Image (cartoon, rainbow, N blue to C red):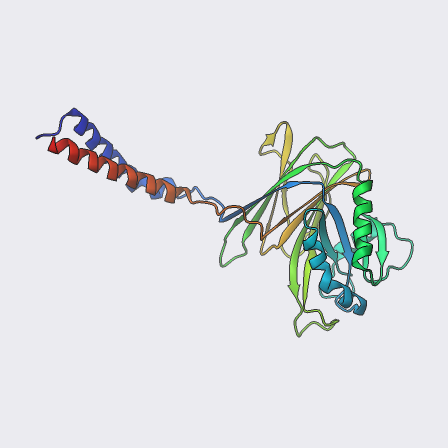
Amino acid sequence: MRPGSDAWDMQKGMAMALIMLILLPFVSADVRTPDESREANGGHAILLEQYTATWCDTCATVDPWISEFVDDHSSRIVRVALHPDDHDPFGSPLTTKRVALKQADHSLSLPTFWFDGQGELEGSVTQSLLENELRSAEGNREHWIGMQVWWDTWYNQPHGDIQTLYLHLGEELPENAKITIFRLETLEMTSENISYNGIDTHHDVATQMITFTPNGTILDSFDGEQGWEVSNGNLYSEGGIPVFIIDTTGTVDSFVTVIEVNEEVRGVIGISNEEILRKAEKSGDFALLLLLGVLVGSSIALRREATQ
């Protein structure tokens, strides 16, 4: 039996699907989704800044359990390791700037810890002492500012991967507020490094830092080896609040965002490379499967129509 008008419509549909299938590589060639995407919500965490060094013997007795302490309190605390800019291979002017903000009027011991920039602890601390300071810092945080952070990665071999951070604030900030973003990495000691206290792997090392105002004006920046690119929300906004877009390259373990108002910490959030919430799908692959489904379905329908 010859197919009727319905079958003819199906044949035309199949032909259109084939044309789309042929043109798909050209249509989707410029459409690229991230290879990895992550998302984090919060702002209530306490910022733990640790002044440490690869040549510090006291640090060698503390550092091995600090990472575990932070992991055990991961919903409450975010750590940033600051190495001095002297004989430490992981040190940089970034540390000098952060320590200067603490307004310490004495020579700091190693290690030294700050909770939200306050509660200075020096020397060989204990876990119970850190627990007490953490609770104290949480009690002193009268108000915290919520944030949403998205982190996309585009593989860019053989060049450095492209990392894009999107920051959306939960409320409009006053003019005297400032936003600081740290780039953190896990660094390994090598035989070329002279300063050595026996610790091979150093976690949460701050290798880049950028500070800007709510309107996107950059106040301070330490670019490290990779550099920053910042958009002040001109691309889009949500609820009238701009979305800040920060780009860098290379391998990143995590980012930490800190909001300060009147020099007091009011919001902290960390996002880690391990927190991959979804593997970004390729739109071209999805469209291909959809078209194949249309073709298979149309073929089955035509066969049924022809046998009736």
Question: Residue 165: where, in percent of width, then height?
Answer: 60, 44
Q: Quadrant of residue 259?
A: top right
Q: Is residue 226 left or right of residue 219?
A: left
Query: Residue at point 41% right, 41% down?
Result: 283
Q: Is residue 201 above or below residue 255?
A: below
Query: Residue at point 72% right, 66% down?
Result: 89
Q: Is residue 16 above or below residue 50?
A: above
Q: Is residue 89 above or below residue 251?
A: below
* Residue 175 or residue 79, whichever sits in front: 79
Question: Residue 1: where, in percent of width, then height?
Answer: 8, 30
Q: Is residue 116 visible?
A: no
Q: Is residue 24 left or right of residue 265?
A: left
Q: Residue furthest left?
A: 1
Q: Is residue 261 visible?
A: yes
Q: Is residue 43 left or right of residue 99?
A: left
Query: Residue at point 15% right, 31% down?
Result: 305
Q: Residue furthest front?
A: 128
Q: How many marks?
A: 0
Question: Residue 201: where, in percent of width, then height?
Answer: 67, 66
Question: Residue 152: where, in percent of width, then height?
Answer: 55, 46
* Residue 140 or residue 209, whichever sits in front: 140
* Residue 112 or residue 22, whichever sits in front: 112
Q: Is residue 131 left or right of residue 288?
A: right
Q: Quadrant of the C terminus?
A: top left
Query: Residue at point 18% right, 26% down?
Result: 6
Q: Residue furthest right?
A: 105
Q: Residue furthest top?
A: 5
